[in-house]
Image (spheres, coloured by chain):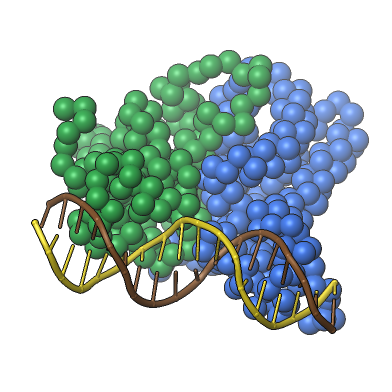
Chain colours: A green, B blue, C yellow, D brown
Amino acid sequence: MSEPRDTRSRILDVAEELFSENGVDRVSIRDITKKARVNLAAINYHFGSKEDLIAAVFERRIVPMNEARLAALDAVERTSPMGPRLEDILESFIRPTIQHSGTTTAGGKAFSKLFGRCLSEPSPEIEALLKRQFEPLSERLNAALTKALPKLSRSDIFWCLKFTFGALHHWHLTKDRFLPAWLAKTEDEEQIKKLIAFSAAGFRAT
Amino acid sequence: MSEPRDTRSRILDVAEELFSENGVDRVSIRDITKKARVNLAAINYHFGSKEDLIAAVFERRIVPMNEARLAALDAVERTSPMGPRLEDILESFIRPTIQHSGTTTAGGKAFSKLFGRCLSEPSPEIEALLKRQFEPLSERLNAALTKALPKLSRSDIFWCLKFTFGALHHWHLTKDRFLPAWLAKTEDEEQIKKLIAFSAAGFRAT
DNA sequence: GTCTATAAGGAGATAGAC
DNA sequence: GTCTATCTCCTTATAGAC
């Protein structure tokens, strides 16, 4: 089970690893097919083009991640019919970040870099992909937050959510880089809790 | 004055614009020399290689930006010998972001994308460049924040600063993308103030 | 400093056999 | 579905004339 799998999956796994390690533009389809030990023509056969492969690699992670976020938001809204606490709303979209691009698997480690790359990637295809994947989630979060913080304007909520997402993403992207020698090791779980507290206070101060 | 300039500067200007628009790997030296109306061989003559050109483009912005951050930190420390307020420390590194990669010039707009790209760029040269450019600033900020928030541990300060930097960077990178139709237009100046208040509350809640 | 010409190689994609 | 062979194009970098 650790090696066979079908050609398509092997390509996805290797592509994710290499893309995040070296950047999509610096990885050739030759690099991928060689490492995956599949034929050079397999990528074009299974995915159509390199561009479509990039989208497939990305969607394989982001779709379940955002589904988990929506499910978590559903869950807290069901539990608190009066509207969930701010912290619970924030947790519903922060926690799936580490659970689904988890630090456990090699591919998971890879994904945050790939996502960061997509954010600064100006390709219209990727821009559309991001919009499609995040718009419904963003709408739901904004609605829940508006209910939890009735004194804030919609704009304020939108921008605070952007700050929070930025903090989350940058933490995830660089949590094992640029660390000073004196820094104590901390569990992801603890850092998530800190981020939730940090952001919640930020929202309330606005 | 709007067009002549020397070959070297013309290359830097055009490279910054094209790199951020299309990504460093998707821009060839041919694209740059053509648009800058200089000879194809000029990049290798003036900069040595494409890689060195990328570093030069990046450093041209980041060096003065971080100098401005350090100068602002010096200034608030001089004004408050007992140690500056948390908000003033945060402002000293947040404000230069918009002033130096300013939204005024075309090149400035370009820079935040280029920076985002560098953060998710795994090239060892760029990683070293970032480290060299940010380590002294990070040390200074951590020291000032430790003084302003004596109850926090060094680790907590480090991670909160990372959250803040992430929020700042992501805001800057996406402040004119992924915006819902209903969103009211806001000035950068106002958003900076919101970010300072947001982060300061986050630090104090930790 | 600037230019032309070219070297030397890697890229994505596909036709067509098996 | 898989493979080989190949087409076509574009890349960075440099040698050497002006």
Q: Is residue B91 visible?
A: yes
Question: Which is nearer the eye, B114 or D16?
Answer: D16
For the image shown, how many numbered marks are present on the structure? 0
Q: Is residue A146 visible?
A: no
Name the residue located 34 percent from the left edge and 61 percent from the top edge: A51
| Residue B156 image-quadrant placement | top right
In the image: residue B181, left or right of residue B199? left
Name the residue located 72 percent from the left edge and 33 percent from the top edge: B135
- Whole-percent x and y of residue B204? 61, 28
Q: Quadrant of the C terminus of chain A?
A: top right
Name the residue located 82 percent from the left edge and 46 percent from the top edge: B67
Question: Which is nearer the eye, C4 or A198?
Answer: C4
State whether residue B66 is above or below residue C8: above
| Residue A84 image-quadrant placement | top left
Name the residue located 50 percent from the left edge and 18 percent from the top edge: A186
In the image: residue A12, left or right of residue B95? left
Q: Quadrant of the N terminus of chain A?
A: top left
In the image: residue A149, left or right of residue B52? left
| Residue A94 image-quadrant placement | top left
- Whole-percent x and y of residue B42? 74, 69
- Whole-percent x and y of residue B188? 64, 60
Question: Which is nearer the eye, A81 or B10?
Answer: B10
- Whole-percent x and y of residue B101? 70, 58
State whether residue A89 is above or below residue A147: above
State whether residue B128 is above or below residue B121: above
Question: Which is nearer the eye, A66 or A156?
Answer: A66
